[in-house]
Image: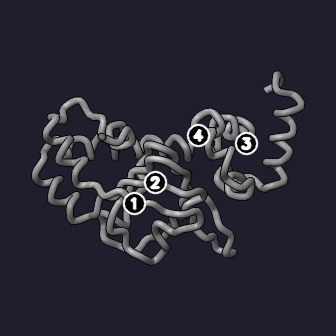
């Protein structure tokens, strides 16, 4: 049976059925437990993962040694540290599981082989990378143009699983606010939902 997560991640109008089958077959099912590191800083990424079930996050340590969450990964998303994987350099980020995670792994060498063999995979890769650049740019602009409350509501709408399972401190650092500010925002939303 084909994984829904693989179908969603590799959804691209030009793939031929046999190409998709070859890509799907190149993945290996792997399970991580809550607290497991998928990637540690200063290590070079040698694979990417498609998350079938669970929640993971990437984070960096700031100049004071505090963890700052840079992204949350939810079902049907690709867990990847692009710079490390494709530039073959040590990662600046850590990627860790917030819950148990079921993933499909594609190692770098296999991806490179398929990338050169299947032209449509190259086109899919370009489309995916363009989308990620857009998402990254949008997020950086929203950090300055939207209120913390609006950023929280956007996260709640886009990735409700994060609000349900990630600790408050991690969500706050992702939104660029203090734990106290986030607690206040959540209380205000509960007591005055119509005002927002």
In the rendered view, tell whether residue 41 sits above or below residue 58.
below
Comes first in the chain, label 1 or label 2: 1
Comes first in the chain, label 4 or label 1: 1
- Which circle marks residue 30 in the picture? 1
Rounded to the nearest angstrom, the CA distance separating label 3 from label 2 is 32 Å
Q: Residue at x 78, y 55 (%)?
A: 178
Comes first in the chain, label 3 or label 2: 2
Q: Which residue is mark 2?
A: 102
Left or right for 43, reference 196: left
| Residue 69 on image: x %, y % | 61, 59
Q: Residue at x 30, y 63 (%)?
A: 86
Rounded to the nearest angstrom, the CA distance separating label 1 from label 3 is 36 Å
Q: Closer to us: mark 4 or mark 1?
A: 1
In the rendered view, tell whether residue 152 sits above or below residue 93.
above
| Residue 89 on image: x %, y % | 35, 73
Left or right for 107, reference 65: left
Q: Which residue is mark 4?
A: 159
Comes first in the chain, label 3 or label 4: 3
- Which circle marks residue 148 in the picture? 3
| Residue 88 on image: x %, y % | 31, 71
Q: Residue at x 54, y 68 (%)?
A: 36
In the rendered view, tell whether residue 142 sits above or below residue 55.
above
Q: Closer to us: mark 3 or mark 2?
A: 2
Rounded to the nearest angstrom, the CA distance separating label 4 from label 1 is 23 Å
SS class, disc 2: strand
Q: Residues within 10 Å of mark 1 (few under 14, many from 20)?
A: few
Q: Closer to us: mark 3 or mark 4?
A: 4
């Amino acid at each position: 049976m084909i994984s829904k997560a693989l179908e969603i991640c590799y959804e691209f109008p030009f793939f031929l059925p046999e190409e998709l089958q070859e890509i799907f077959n190149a993945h290996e099912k792997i399970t991580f437990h809550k607290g497991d590191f998928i990637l540690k800083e200063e290590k070079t990424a040698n694979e990417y993962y498609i998350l079938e079930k669970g929640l993971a996050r990437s984070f960096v340590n700031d100049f004071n040694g505090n963890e700052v969450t840079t992204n949350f990964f939810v079902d049907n998303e690709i867990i990847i540290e692009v710079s490390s994987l494709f530039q073959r350099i040590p990662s600046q980020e850590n990627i860790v599981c917030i819950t148990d995670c079921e993933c499909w792994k594609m190692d770098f060498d296999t991806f490179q082989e398929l990338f050169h063999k299947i032209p449509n995979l190259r086109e899919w890769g370009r489309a995916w990378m363009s989308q990620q650049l857009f998402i990254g740019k949008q997020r950086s602009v929203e950090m300055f143009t939207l209120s913390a409350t609006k950023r929280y509501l956007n996260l709640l709408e886009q990735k409700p699983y994060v609000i349900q399972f990630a600790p408050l401190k991690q969500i706050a650092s992702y939104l660029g606010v203090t734990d106290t500010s986030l607690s206040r925002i959540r209380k205000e939303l509960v007591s005055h939902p119509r005002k927002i």
